[in-house]
Amino acid sequence: MKKALIAITLFIATAAFTTAGLWKNDKAHSQLQFTVTHLGINDVSGTFNDFDVTVKSDKDDFSDAVFELSAKTASIDTRVEARNNHLKSADFFDVEKYPEIKFSSTGIRKVSKDNYKLTGNLTIHGVTKATTLDLVYKGQTVNPMSKHETVGFQVKGTIKRSDFSLGSKFPEAVISDLVTIKADGEFTK
């Protein structure tokens, strides 16, 4: 009886910490997207196709999570090669000089059951700014293909491109100063 009680206690303790640890994004099921308004009348979106995200957490509700993101600026993709090349130039991201975008979280605050405010330092074009984003914990499951424990997150927010000296030659009437960011990701241990 005593051995059974110890075994049950260990099982419960282990199950309570199933989400603890280091999680990495599954690149095939993750996306880092941005949207700007062009000429004040139309939204144009793009993605960064080469990025890595890690999530460290010791709590099963991720209320202590630490997020780290690194995206290669040369991986920008707006589905138009000429526009991609212009965005890679010194007019915008200057990918030769600033090859990465980085985000390091500095805090997380639970707003409701699966909703959080994620604060951190965002570095783009050599400029670092404190940024607050909306984070949604989308849930946890076992991937039937890989058999790995998998969690999902969505991050949304808005930044000003002028805060990062991006495209300063282009007025807001041409390209909006506000840039919407949306990231969706699946993560495995």
Image: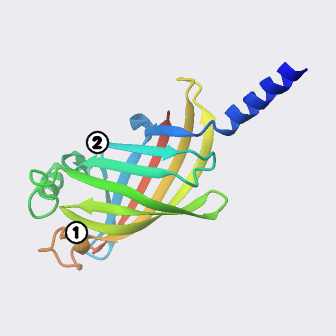
Which quarter of the figure has residue 33? bottom left
Against 174, is 108 above or below? above
Q: Residue 172's quadrant in the figure?
A: bottom left
Residue 135 visible in the shown view: yes
Q: What's the mark number on residue 164?
A: 1
Q: Residue sitting at 30 percent across and 43 percent down?
A: 49
Under tag 2, what secondary structure? loop
Q: Residue sitting at 39 percent across and 44 percent down?
A: 53
Label 2 sits on residue:
50
Q: Are marks 1 and 2 in contact (CB under 8 Å)?
A: no
Relative height, residue 100 to residue 148 (above, below): below
* Other-residue count near label 1 (Cα within 10 Å), few / some / many at <14 / 14–19 / ≥20: some
Residue 109 relative to residue 89: left or right: right
Where is residue 126 shown, x and y percent of the image?
Answer: 18, 61
Which quarter of the figure is the N terminus placed in?
top right
Task: In this rendered view, identify the residue nearer to me: 107 or 122.
Answer: 107
Say what amino acid the circle numbered 1 marks: Phe
| Left or right side of 17 for 95 | left
Question: Measured from the top left, where is residue 106 in percent x and y?
Answer: 42, 60
Callout 1: SS: helix
Picture residue at 23% right of the left edge, 80% below the top: 173
Q: Give the colouring mode of the picture.
A: rainbow
Give 78 or 50, whichever is nearer the viewer: 50
Q: Earlier in the sequence, mark 1 or mark 2?
A: 2
Q: Give the number of the disc on residue 148.
A: none
The quarter of the displayed image where residue 159 is located: bottom left
Farthest-out residue, front: 2
* Extreme residue toward the right, this view: 1
Looking at the rendered structure, the kind of residue marked 2 is Asp
Image x and y of residue 57, in percent: 53, 46
Q: CA distance from mark 1 to mark 2?
A: 20 Å
